[in-house]
Amino acid sequence: MEKIEEIKVDYKMYKELCSMLKGSEEDFEIACSNIANIKLSNIMITLLSKNLSYGKRSRFMDKFTKEICAVFKTEENKLNLKWDEIYNHITVDPDLTDLEKNIMTKEIEDMVLETLKSLEYTFIKTIKIELK
């Protein structure tokens, strides 16, 4: 589908898209339609995909297979959305923006923080990491 509108994507919009994708079926479809119609980078689409789980990730990847495969420079059946794989592929991309790197860093920080809290380290308020 041809991207028809250029909209500046910032962290707030990224989080709103994540929220919609995780919401109701109608919200998921609206978010997918919005993503398809705005100028969103393949890296950003990959990061949105990583933010989803199970069935919704699978359905999202079905809709945006071409874009996600472009990041990994591979075929669909060889996609691996582990964070180290995503990091290895997007950090060598000359089109990687500071926003995309910051989003990836924030997503990993949130994941580490939630993991620590699930292990009852509830006294930890924030985690800051620096990616290579």
Image (cartoon, rainbow, N blue to C red):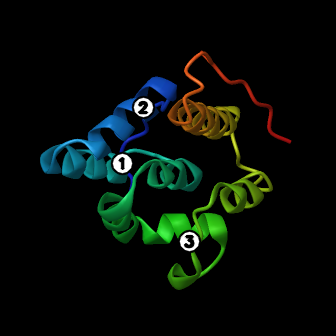
Q: Is residue 22 above or below residue 66?
A: above
Question: Which sits in the foreground, 97 or 77?
Answer: 77
- Amino acid type shown at disc 1: Ile
Left or right: where does residue 8 sit relative to residue 18?
right
Q: Residue 19: which quarter of the image?
A: top left
* Within-10-Å neighbours for mark 3: few <14, some 14–19, many 20+: some
Q: Residue at x 48, y 71 (%)?
A: 66
Left or right: where does residue 69 sit relative to residue 24?
right
In the image, residue 128 lies at what x, y percent?
72, 24
Q: Name the residue furthest right.
A: 132
Left or right: where does residue 79 sit relative to residue 97?
left
Q: Earlier in the sequence, mark 3 or mark 1?
A: 1
Residue that badge 3 annotates: 69
Question: Mark 2 or mark 1, which is nearer to you?
Answer: 2
In the image, residue 119 lies at what x, y percent?
56, 36
For the N terminus, give its image quadrant.
bottom left
Judge whether residue 1 can be spotted in this image. no
Judge whether residue 46 can be spotted in this image. yes
How far apart marks 2 and 1 lie (CA) works out to 13 Å
Q: Is residue 119 above or below residue 86?
A: above
Question: Mark 3 or mark 2, which is nearer to you?
Answer: 2
Residue that badge 1 annotates: 35
How far apart marks 3 and 2 lie (CA) works out to 23 Å
Q: Name the residue furthest front.
A: 120
Question: Which sits in the foreground, 100 or 49?
Answer: 49
Label 2 element class = helix
Q: Residue 85: which quarter of the image?
A: bottom right
